[in-house]
Amino acid sequence: QVQLVESGGGVVQAGGSLRLSCAASGRTFSTNFMAWFRQAPGKEREFVAAINWSGNIPYYLNSVKGRFTISRDNAENTVVLQMNSLKPEDTAVYYCAAGKAHLSYDYWGQGTQVTVSS
């Protein structure tokens, strides 16, 4: 089992920045890929960003490219999502996920709320 705990959500004005962190514990060798998803009210959960074990291959949702950056520190078992130039449409609960392959995530955090006001 892998336990994931997110932190760093909050309320920010449009154009501002937030930094989300996710700490992994347990069987962290199962975290080849780590990712962030989000779910806005009334919408389905969507993929936001992911990164491989080495940290050299990131994947992004098109609408966040150039604004969000995902990174990981395997020594600390953490993954970070730096979010800049935030827009109201980025408002959602953000979830950390981990798994052995991209888009195949077995473990999920409890989520952290991000609210961007206009």
Image: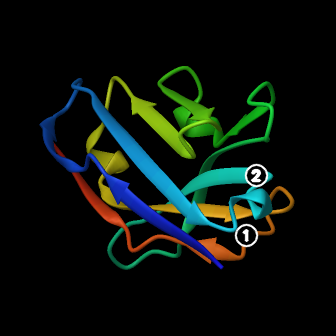
Q: Amino acid at mark 1?
A: Tyr
Is disc 1 surrounded by few (<14), some (14 to 19) or many (20+) residues within 10 Å?
A: some
Name the residue type under label 2.
Phe
Location of the N terminus by quadrant is bottom right
| SS at mark 1 in the image | loop
Residue 21 can be seen in this image: yes
**In-front residue for pair 117/48:** 48
Q: Is residue 9 above or below residue 71?
A: below
Residue 118 in view: no
In front of the other: 14 or 53: 53
Residue beneath disc 2: 33
Q: Is residue 70 left or right of residue 115?
A: right
At x 60%, y 35%, the residue is 72
- Name the N-terminal-most of marks 2 and 1: 2
Q: Which residue is mark 1?
A: 105
User: How far, Cα to Cα, is label 2 from label 1?
Assistant: 8 Å
Q: Identify the residue at horizontal 53%, vertical 34% (top origin).
A: 64
The x, y position of residue 50, in whole percent, is 68, 45
The x and y percentages for residue 57 are 81, 30
Based on the displayed image, in which of its 4 quarters is residue 103 positioned? bottom right
Relative to 25, say whether 32 is above or below: above
Q: Taking 66 as reference, is 87 left or right? A: left
**Dot 2: element:** strand
Position of residue 37 relative to residue 67, above or below, is below
- From the top left corner, tell me how far across and down residue 110 is, in percent: 39, 74
Quadrant of res 14: top left
Q: Residue furthest right?
A: 101
Q: Name the colouring of the figure.
A: rainbow
Q: Is residue 102 left or right of residue 5?
A: right
Q: Are marks 2 and 1 in contact (CB under 8 Å)?
A: yes
Residue drawn at (47%, 37%) of the image? 81
Q: Residue at x 32, y 74 (%)?
A: 41
